[in-house]
Image (cartoon, grey):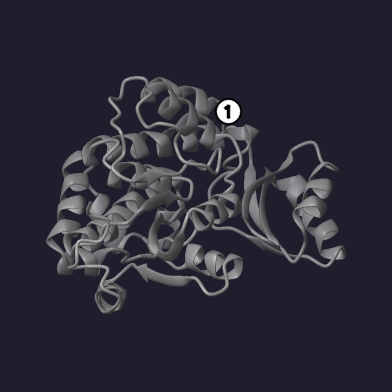
Amino acid sequence: MDKIAIMFAGQGDQYPGMGKELYETSPAAKEVFDMAEALRPGTIRQCFEGTPQELMQTENTQPCLYCVDLAAAMALSEAGLKPDFAAGFSLGELAALTFSKAVGMEEGFRLVTKRGELMKEAAGKVNSVMAAVLKLDNETVESLCSHYDQVYPVNYNCKGQLVVAGVKEEVDLFKEEAREKGATVLMLPLSGGFHSPFMESASVAFEKELREVDFHKPELVLYSNYTARPYPSGQDKQEYVSLLSRQIANPVRWQQLVEHMHREGAKIFIEVGAGKTLSKLVRRMIPGAQIYNVENKESLEQTLQALKEKGLIGSGHREE
């Protein structure tokens, strides 16, 4: 039987109203939002009514997207879906960690909230931005970055799409040089230069937070952004501490991660959370992949219907 990978969205596709229909449709999704509201009052309002500017601030983006990601996944689980693999893009890795039951739902939310606060603090130390570079190969983008003191390749999304982070003044110059090479360069709606050396202080501080957490062996194969491979055993606490803290200040190797899941048998990819960015990336990487997304009532119903027709829910998928 085809294996299923569930993918948890990261920052960039947040929008006002995200998650509201899931909250109103699924008891399991509602439980996620209610948990978050109890721990961080105002989270539901930010998700359902927050302005684009408010949602762009990483201290808000991260806990809000965690809720939408996890709520969508729990709505699928509530209906009987049992994925084989889990991976999240950047902050989405915390939602994947929670969904795999390596940490509890409240602990995962506490961690992602703290992560957002630490990354905001680090971003405030320098005027840094992020930009997606399209239509150039990775080597060319890496070479262009080397022309600048503080521009770094950070998100290896797919072939022909690499995100860079840097100080604004240098990224402005980088954009012109990249465009001369034939690139399309798009500035991203993010509030700092994430997954770069600018985040080193957040990485160090988050490591201390992680040392206080009790981790458990995940119930499905859980992938790391830092290595693009599964967590080695899922039983060594230091693995979690190291991989989750390093992830903040190092590149996201999403292309390698998805390609590895595909080699391990993933044929069905379900994106959960706001937007369809990860779905689009998989479509470019793996022609013929079966791709679905869940972010609202309509997409939840469509995905559940497709999975039912394939016999992937209601038939004990992955049960031994």
**In the picture, residue 187 is in which quadrant?**
bottom right
Residue 127 location, quadrant: top right
Amino acid found under the numbered disc labelled 1: Glu
Instruction: Using the rendered image of the protein, determine whether residue 176 is visible from the camera's viewpoint.
Output: yes
Q: Is residue 274 visible?
A: no
Left or right placement of residue 135 versus residue 69 in this view: right
Of residues 107 and 285, the one drawn nearer to the viewer in this rendering: 285
Q: Nearer the viewer, residue 143 or 64?
A: 143
Q: Residue at x 43, y 50 (%)?
A: 88
x, y percentage for residue 67? Answer: 29, 52
Q: Residue at x 30, y 33 (%)?
A: 217
What secondary structure is found at the residue carrying circle 1?
A: helix
Q: How many marks?
A: 1
Location of residue 41 with respect to 77 vertically, above or below: above
Q: Quadrant of residue 2?
A: bottom left
Q: Which residue is mark 1?
A: 200
At horizontal 37% and vertical 33% (from top left) the residue drawn is 114
- The x and y percentages for residue 151 are 74, 43
Q: Position of residue 155 (x, y in %)?
A: 61, 49
Query: Where does the image place residue 236, in percent across and percent down from the top left?
Result: 38, 23
Left or right of residue 313, residue 238 in this image: right
Badge 1, how many Cα within 10 Å: few under 14, some, many 20+?
Answer: some
Q: For the N terminus, give its image quadrant.
A: bottom left
Indicate whether 158 appears above or below 247.
Answer: below
Answer with left or right where residue 186 lies relative to residue 44. right
**In this orientation, which residue lies closer to the viewer: 314 or 227?**
314
Residue in the image at 16% along x and 57% along y: 28
